[in-house]
Image (cartoon, rainbow, N blue to C red):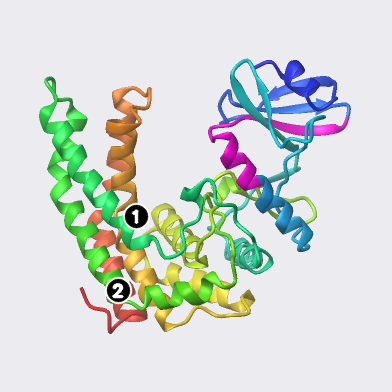
Amino acid sequence: MQPEAVLACYGLVLKTKEQLPGAGPRVLKLETSDGPKVLKRSRIKETEIGFVHLAQEHLARRGFKWATRFDLTLDGLPYCKHAGEVFVLSPWIEARPVSLRRRRELHAAVARVAELHLYSHGFAAPSEPASRVVWGKWPEIFRNRLDQLSVYKRLAHESDAKTSFDRRYIGLLSYYWDQGATAIAMLLRTPYRRVMEVEALNASLCHHDLTHRNILLGESGQLHLIDLDYCIADTRLHDIGSLILRHCKRFGWDVRWAHEVIAAYNARAPEPVGADDMAILAALLHWPQDFWQVGLQYYIERQPWPLDRFLESLDRKTGGRREREKFLAAFRRKFAPDLGI
């Protein structure tokens, strides 16, 4: 990365640069002639950056002050192309990642996400990229991903030199394929289509990447939502389910965490999460996203990671599956007792 050359696209001068701990070489903190910035080598395509830029600007126009925005180049673009790569630049926020273990910070983070959903109402999503507009598409997406699990199985079996990852993945695949099929059956028994038709009228956004590192607590106590690179036009339930899963994976599969997240969301949202929403959430939580994703990274994307990293990821994402099963059953009993499986 050559930050001096990239900053020239913005008419800025580099003073200092700093590698951020744990962020990898694609992200730098820069001190520039216009103050501190974050420079990131983007992983998404230019059309997707355009989608994210429109989303960020829509939020800003609506008065949402707690999301990052891209700086514009001298040509008025939200990205800079240099040496065959694409870069985005944003103002630096002096803050730390939120601690979701602390109840006060968890509630504040969930409230800020609820505000993001509210302020994003009326977003006119562009037609491209089509993958960013997800209204009503969950059954289709789940079926496609279930088919992909079968592809991963075939690729693993056809490998001339099976690795320890291949063998472990094959051993777990039947279990998670059944979970995926069950999630689809559950979803089809919910009023998903009707609820999406109503929610789509709001034309809202999902952050879609709510790791604790993307929810920052500033020195003044304000929470910021950064890195909207993967935001999509979809139901708020997508983000709510993500928050529940991320919290449970970090702090234990206890249905009380789900209740905590939903109660905090309802305390801020003008439209509380209702019984129909809870049934849809139950189906979403049942979908084996982590298992599907690590297979995608290994068999399709062929990420250039050492085998040990894939094995560690698979073990981490499939460990505690009995506890997860108990959580899913408890969630259905408490929040969607009429859904069944």
Q: To which residue does mark 1 refer?
A: 141
Residue 339 on image: x %, y %: 27, 79
Toward which corner of the image does residue 327 lie, by quadrant? bottom left
The magenta span reads: 34-52
Could you say where residue 332 lies in the image, as x and y percent from the top left? Answer: 30, 75
**Is residue 7 a member of the stretch shown in magenta?**
no
Tag of residue 330: 2
- In this rendered view, identify the residue nearer to me: 301 or 26: 301
Front residue (pair 69, 217): 69
Q: Indicate whether 232 appears above or below 71.
A: below
Left or right of residue 336, residue 124 in this image:
right
Residue type at mark 1 is Ile
Q: Is residue 254 above or below residue 165?
A: below
Q: Is residue 79 above or below residue 65?
A: above
Q: Quadrant of the C terminus?
A: bottom left
Residue at the spot 17% in from the left edge and 44% down from the top edge: 150
Residue found 61% across the figure and 65% down from its top: 117
Coordinates of residue 269 in the picture (x, y in percent): 61, 75
Circle 2: element type = helix
